[in-house]
Image (cartoon, helix red, strand yellow):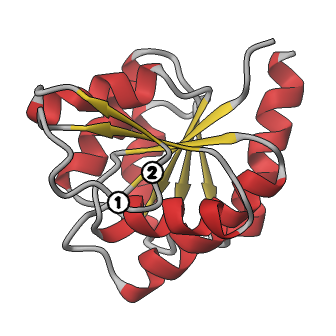
Amino acid sequence: MKKIIIGVMGPGHQATATDINNAYQLGKLIAQQGWVLLSGGRNVGVMDAASRGAKSVGGLTVGILPHNSLEGVSEAIDIPILTDMGQARNNINVLSSDVVIACGMGLGTASEVALALKNDKPVIILTEDPETIHFFMTLSRDKVLSATTPETAIELVREILRNSA
């Protein structure tokens, strides 16, 4: 039976302390649900924090890496997938996820959200920035949900999964 894969996308080096804390909590909560956490796999920012959170409670983590080597991979990644595709790997991130959670925002994250919406994937934006939420909701009101806490984001994932079953 296919496992549920939740993609957590967010800034790397530009991640804020709030982004890092939210991502860590998201990772823990995702793993506690028995879901697989998928991220960009690197050892920086949201992707590292979410993976560390999942690993702290025994979760399974997958990292879709932009390079052809393990250089810069998070120590919290169980299954590293080398793509040698650079930013094009963002499409793999979203297509492999059942639900995408954008934790914070940056250019790479914005591209992942846009790719998810183009591919009819549900997206939860975890931020307190009303401009970010408004922008993506104008693009796809029926596929974008917003949350201000990791707990709310997980409740929204549960609702999405219930409605898609």
Q: Residue at x 89, y 28 (%)?
A: 162
Query: Which quarter of the rendered picture does the C terminus lie within?
Result: top right
The kind of secondary structure element at disc 2 is loop
Depth check: 30 or 140 in front?
30
Q: Residue at x 56, y 72 (%)?
A: 24
Q: How crowded is the residue under tag 1: few (<14 C-alpha within 10 Å), some, or many (20+)?
A: many
89 vs 138, left or right, is left
Q: Residue at x 51, y 59 (%)?
A: 51
**Decide: marks 2, 1 in contact (CB < 8 A)?**
yes
Residue 108 x %, y %: 21, 48
Residue 14 x %, y %: 21, 73
Q: Which mark is residue 77?
A: 2
47 vs 107, left or right, is right
**Residue ID for mark 1:** 74
Residue 71 x %, y %: 15, 52
Count of labels in the image: 2
Q: Say above or below: 79 vs 75.
A: above
Q: Say above or below: 27 vs 102.
A: below
Three-letter code for the amino acid on which mark 1 is drawn:
Ser
The kind of secondary structure element at disc 1 is loop
Q: Which mark is residue 58?
A: none
Say which quarter of the image contains residue 32. Answer: bottom right
Q: Residue at x 29, y 64 (%)?
A: 43
Depth check: 165 or 140 in front?
165
Residue 88 x %, y %: 16, 26
